Image (cartoon, rainbow, N blue to C red):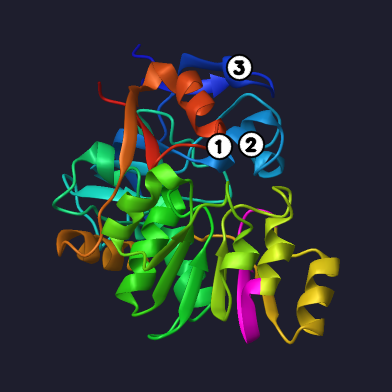
Amino acid sequence: MSSEPTMRAITQNSLGGPEVLRLSDRPRPRPVPTEVLVRVHAAGVNPVDWKSRESGGMAGLLGAPPFVLGWDVSGVVEEVGFGVHTLKVGDEVYGMPWFPRPASAYAEYVTAPSRQFALKPRTLDHNTAAAVPLAGLTAWQSLVDAAHVEAGQRVLIHAAAGGVGHLAVQFAKHLGAHVIGTASAAKHEWLRELGADEVVDYTRVRFEEAVSDVDVVIDLVGEGHDATTSRSLKTLRPGGTIVAVPSGVAPELLDAARARGLNATAFLVEPDGVSLSRIAGLIDEGVVRVEVEGVLPLADAAEAHRRVQEGRTRGKIVLSVTS
């Protein structure tokens, strides 16, 4: 009698530091109607991954260990469930399935609704494409759906050189905005190459003293880091909007924003195959570049987490699942 097929995956049996991540064998998932089975070639690593590993992030939705982390996927469709019309076996796809529910992307196979994937950018290999979904959708949705950025507006992006930030800079520029980014000095020239009109070294100056009359702030840092969110209110002109991505909007911040005639909104990214198709088009047209600082084998997930947790990566860290 044949046994159920298995796959390699990174599991953790307890919450804790990077050392809890272990390579193990797990049952291979099967697609149900409207789902596809994707053979994962690469998986992106994001800050929400290490936060969830420790007990923060989306740990509450993952349930008690053991579980498999990860949401960024690039791979090939291996099987389609009943009712799938948008994808076929052999399609190269990328996506951010199920977020914020578990997707278990640090594995050789994932299953998810077909419309949570899109054809991956033709000009990117799987390792680079896997860096895009969560970061790209966060950048796109925060600018377009939450802030409604328009041409001619002044947009301030914190952590502009990070995985989300470097894409947000390019998306905002594509939308016609005047883009201002905060980053350490070593990354300024690169950010200008990506389209930033102004770059502020947050390690040397108080950004709220260097920047003013901003229409939109995309805060990718959070209030816990030197009160970045509340300090950002000082940069906004009346009627301006701050989108607080990592830490949300506390009642005190909302009150402070309203007192200044400002808008403050929390944000959480959603799976969105339609927007991923739009992003893929911008990448293939050469409008948007994707930065990957490092690619590590799946077995080195713990080291990938250590690097991302340091918070100083330029672009993204990716796990190569097929290497």
Q: Nearer the viewer, residue 40 or 314?
A: 314
Label 2 crowd (10 A; few <14 / some 14-19 / many >=20): some
Q: Residue at x 39, y 54 (%)?
A: 166
Q: Could one spot residue 239 in this view of the protein? A: yes
Q: Nearer the viewer, residue 269 or 190?
A: 190
Q: Position of residue 43 (x, y in %)?
A: 37, 36
For residue 67, which quarter of the picture? top right
From the image, which quarter does the C terminus lie in?
top left
For residue 52, which quarter of the picture? top right
Q: Main secondary structure of the magenta part?
A: strand
The mark found on residue 49 in the picture is 1
For the residues labelled 2 and 3, say whether their Cβ atoms are less than 8 Å apart.
no
**Does label 3 or label 1 sit earlier along the sequence?**
3
| The magenta segment | 235-247
Please, is residue 22 above or below residue 311 in the view?
Answer: above
Q: Residue at x 60, y 16 (%)?
A: 20
For the residues labelled 2 and 1, say whether their Cβ atoms are less than 8 Å apart.
yes
The disc labelled 1 sits on which kind of residue? Asp
Q: Residue at x 71, y 33 (%)?
A: 55
Residue annotated with mark 2: 52
Q: Position of residue 93 (x, y in %)?
A: 25, 49
Gap in angstroms between the C-alphas marked 2 and 3:
12 Å
